[in-house]
Amino acid sequence: MAIENRGEMIMANKHRVLFVCVHNSFRSQIAEAIMNSKYGDIFTAESAGLTVKEINPLAIKVMKEYGIDISNNSVDSVFDFFKEGRLYSYVITVCSKEAENECPIFPGIRKRINWNLEDPEAFEGTDEEKYQKAMKLRNEIEKRIDDFAKPAE
């Protein structure tokens, strides 16, 4: 096998994961970044939303403290990915079950999973209280990713 094809072969052997949330502004962005950072040798993660809006500043802040800058990440529509015919081993929705039901069914997925995580748009309280909730949510996402990825190692 030629060396230039080696990277493509490794990429083809990875499990492709799509994280979906309502706006692709917090939960799915964080999940994509953590999955690629911690488990990029076995998984290739992307993220998308049902509707798109800017990345939540709290997501940028809690990920920067984690050591990952997501401020320049693209914000993508799940429906664009679907129309492009992208294929995934897993589609993981990180939103409510009701919102998850609006996601398109991707052909060829091995498994579709819902992680019913709190919506950061609903965070109430002072800026510090919202920040603490954002940190807690980031940590919960990381724990779920760790639990999900362990069987694949």
Image (spheres, rainbow, N blue to C red):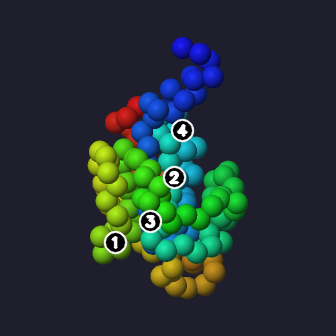
What whole-number distance in Å separates the C-alpha atoms at marks 1 and 4? 28 Å
Mark found first going from the N terminus, 4 or 2 = 4
Q: Mark 4 points at which residue?
A: 40
For mark 2, give the secondary structure: strand
Which image quadrant: the N terminus?
top right
Which disc number belongs to residue 79? 3
Q: Depth-wise, is mark 3 or mark 4 nearer the camera?
A: 3
Q: Depth-wise, is mark 1 or mark 4 nearer the camera?
A: 1
Which image quadrant: the C terminus?
top left
In this view, the residue farthest toward the bottom is 125
Mark found first going from the N terminus, 1 or 2 = 2
Amino acid at the residue labelled 2: Glu
Mark found first going from the N terminus, 3 or 4 = 4
For mark 1, give the secondary structure: loop
Mark found first going from the N terminus, 1 or 3 = 3
What whole-number distance in Å separates the C-alpha atoms at marks 1 and 2? 18 Å
When the figure is inspected, residue 79 is found, relative to residue 149, above or below; the finding is below
Please tell me which residue is depicted at 51% across the width and 39% down the height of the picture. 39
Picture coordinates of residue 13, whole percent (x, y): 44, 30
Picture coordinates of residue 132, whole percent (x, y): 56, 71
Q: Are marks 4 and 2 in contact (CB under 8 Å)?
A: no
What whole-number distance in Å separates the C-alpha atoms at marks 3 and 4? 24 Å
Q: Name the residue under label 2.
A: 46
Picture coordinates of residue 99, whole percent (x, y): 35, 73
Which disc number belongs to residue 102? 1
71 lies left or right of 141: right
